Image (cartoon, helix red, strand yellow):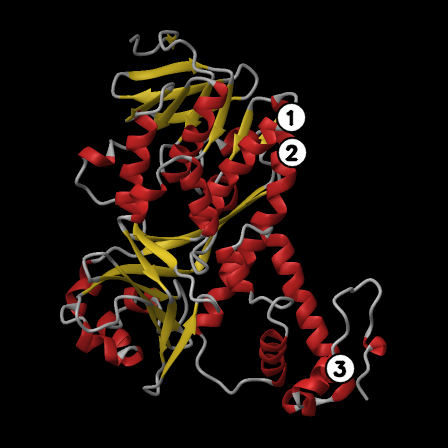
Amino acid sequence: MNGNGTDRTDGNPETVIVGAGLVGAVTALYLAPRFGPVTLLEKRADPRRNSGGQGRSLVVMLSARGWRALSDLGVADAVRRICVPLHGRRGHLPDGRTRMTPYSRDGQPIWAVERRRLHHILLDAAEATPGVRIRFGQRVRSVDLDEPAVLVEDRHGSHRLTCRRVLGCDGAHSAARAALEARGTRAEVRTLDLAYQEIDVPAGRLDPTITHYWPSGKAMFAAHPLPSGRLSGSLFMRLDGPAPSYAAARGGQDLYEMFAAHFPELTGIIPDIAEQLATKAVSTLTAVRCDRWVWRDTFALLGDSCHAMAPFMGHGMNCGFEDARVLVDCLDASADWAAGLAAYEKSRTEDADAISRLSYRHYFTMAGPPREETAAEALRGRLTALFPDRFVPLYERCAFTEESYASVLRDDERLDRLVADLLARYGTELVSAPDDRLRACTPSPHPTTATLEDSECS
């Protein structure tokens, strides 16, 4: 290879995918059988041969959208063998009580899987797929949207790889996205005011079939079971501001003392917590919003490169896998790549915005201190129980269906408005009214034709 020349020796792959992470590998698996040779370019070394730290959370959650992709690609059975089914989450409250919330009303679990092991399965599957080539140690410096081509740097120097199209799957700090930004695309990349440390939690003290979390209002600790029986924990605190925060720890306050003040139960469950807090890296959370994802018929973004989100709904990876599935569905249904990419962008941007909003909001739902249930919350709960098919909990619809995230959010906002209207019309006594009266007061599920005045409640 010519260290500073143009590389014309790879047969000019049909598609170059920048980034061979989880979403990049899934995208290659979908594309190669349909659209010809795919080359994955990954700046890091092959993780299957590299024992170094992975730099990302140890555990990811698989829900219906993720399983759909894995099933399509023929790897679902292999992945399920390394997963832990989780049927709900238990909040360990500051006053010593616990609060159990099932993930679904019919007992369906979500599935916890170690990111590293899932990544290995996907890379093995991609390498075994005809037409897929993975090249590690290849840092993409820039993308030429017009030719198209990518400028790549590796241990031999820099070279230019031409292709027919480029897909950016290279995460929140995407080099591929920069090519769109140079053409006027507006991308918002912001560091959230939350940071975290990964903490190892020993087996034996906590139920290994559910997620555990400790809310304190100003910080939160969450722990997800692993197949070994131990748990992967995460401490979330503000990045800046007064204690508890990582800024306060940098300013001299003792991090262990802050932790013990907010999570005294955990100091007994994790014997070496002081040492872990002192040595484990502090990682930030990045959110990305991008107003354009595609360029003509040659370029598209997927996954965190266009919609990185907070992890609290467990949907970042699932949403990225769904990007890849929707992309190939749009291409299959279109006459050409320009129309397919445009359809993909139109289909996904509103959904990505919706789940990003929900993910960040969910942190405050979980981390908030216990308080008395409001009349609106109580009435929402009654309506959900009374009309189980009409009012499905938001989390359940996100995790166990493939419904549009945007439509789920819109329906949840409609329920908020319905609850507010009912309370305004009938007062808080409706919260404890008999079922028959509440049914009569609730209008039919046709918002364009029904109003509260149509109900038979008096």
Above/below status of 335 relative to 176: above
Give SS at disc 3: helix
The residue type indicated by label 1 comes to Ser
Residue at the spot 74% in from the left edge and 67% down from the top edge = 445
Distance (Cα) linking label 1 and label 3: 47 Å
Q: Which disc is residue 440 wearing?
A: 3
Q: Name the residue under label 1.
A: 334
| The quadrant where residue 214 appears | bottom left
The residue type indicated by label 3 comes to Ala
Distance (Cα) linking label 1 and label 2: 8 Å
- In the rendered structure, the answer to whether residue 40 lies left or right of residue 455 reads left
Q: Mark 2 points at which residue?
A: 343
Query: Looking at the image, is mark 2 or mark 3 earlier in the sequence?
Result: 2
| The quadrant where residue 261 appears | bottom left
Residue at the spot 59% in from the left edge and 83% down from the top edge = 378
The image position of residue 403, as x and y in percent, is 58, 52
Give SS at disc 1: loop
Foreground pick, 16 / 151: 16
Disc number lying in front (1 or 3) = 3
**How many residues crowd around disc 1 within 10 Å: few (fewer than 14), some, or many (20 or more)?**
some
Q: Are circles 1 and 2 on residues that touch, CB within 8 Å?
A: yes
The image position of residue 351, as x and y in percent, is 59, 49
Q: Are circles 2 and 3 on residues that touch, CB within 8 Å?
A: no
Foreground pick, 412 / 183: 412
Above/below status of 282 relative to 101: above
Above/below status of 114 relative to 261: above
